[in-house]
Amino acid sequence: MLNMALTVAFSMVGMAFALSFARLLKGPDATDRVLALDTLYINAIALLVLLGIQLASPLYFEAALLIALMGFVGTVALAKYLLRGDIIE
Amino acid sequence: MSTLAEIILSVLVVAGGVFTLIGSLGLWRMRDFYTRLHGPTKATTLGVGCLLVASSAFFSITGDGLSLHEVLVSLFLFITAPISAHLMTKAALHRHLPSLARLPSTPPISTDSR
C-alpha cells in the first residue's frame, strides 16, 4: 500500500513541478519568476524526500537540507536585487 | 512493518502530495502577484512538512532508534518561508505591481488643510 501511495504522491509532486515551471516561463513580472523558482526548490525537496522513502535510504536528507539552504539564499539574493538594484551594498 | 503504521504512512505521504499540488495550482491559477504569493508559501510548506513527518516515521520504524534529522529541514523551511515571502512582497511593492484589491473610496483622514 505504501508503494501505491508513493506512486500517487510522486505524480502529484510531478504535476506541481510542471505548474511551477509553467509559471516560471510565463510569469508576467520578474517577481513572479522568483516566486516560481522558490516553489520549484520546495518541490525538489519534496521529490527528494519521497525518493528517500522509496529507496529506504537515509542519504537523501543531506541533499534536501542543502537545497533548502541554497534555495533560501538564492531567493533572498534575487529579491534583494529586485528591491535595491544591488545585492551587496 | 505493521498494517496500522503502513496506513498512517500512506495517508501522510498522500496528504503531502495533495498539499504540494494545491500550492502549485494556486501559483498557476491566481490572477495577481499578491494572491499568487499566498498559495505556495503556505500550502507547500505544509505539504513538505507532512512528507518530512512521514519520512521521519518511516525511518524510525524501519531503522534502529528514533530518526530526527528530518526535523532540521522542516524547522529551516518553517523559519525561512515567511522571510522570503516578505522580501518578495517588498520587491513587488517596490516595482508597483498591479493588485486586484481596489483602492479605498474615501481618504480616511482629510488632507486638504494645507
Image (cartoon, helix red, strand yellow):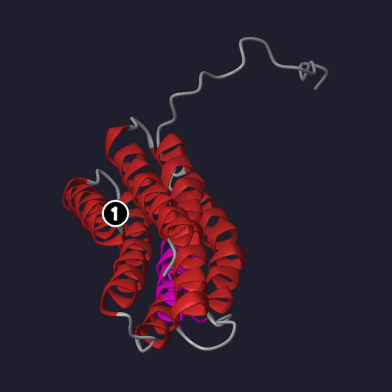
Does residue A87 show up?
no
**Residue at image location 32% in from the left, 68% down from the top:** A50
For residue B7, side relative to residue A43 (left or right): right
Quarter of the image with the N terminus of chain A in it:
bottom left
Percent coordinates x, y for residue B61 in the rendering: 49, 75
Instruction: Kindly indicate the quadrant of the structure image that contains residue A43.
Output: bottom left
**Residue at image location 41% in from the left, 60% down from the top:** B6
- Give the magenta-colored segment's residue range: A68-89
- Disc 1 marks a residue whose amino acid type is Ala
* Outermost residue toward the top in this view: B105
* Outermost residue toward the right in this view: B113
Instruction: Kindly indicate the quadrant of the structure image that contains residue A3.
Output: bottom left
Percent coordinates x, y for residue A78 in the rendering: 40, 68
Residue under label 1: A5
For disc 1, the neighbor class at 10 Å (few under 14, some 14 to 19, many from 20) is some
Q: Nearer the viewer, residue B17 or B2?
A: B2
- What secondary structure is the stretch in magenta mostly built from? helix
B41 over B80 or under it: above or below: above
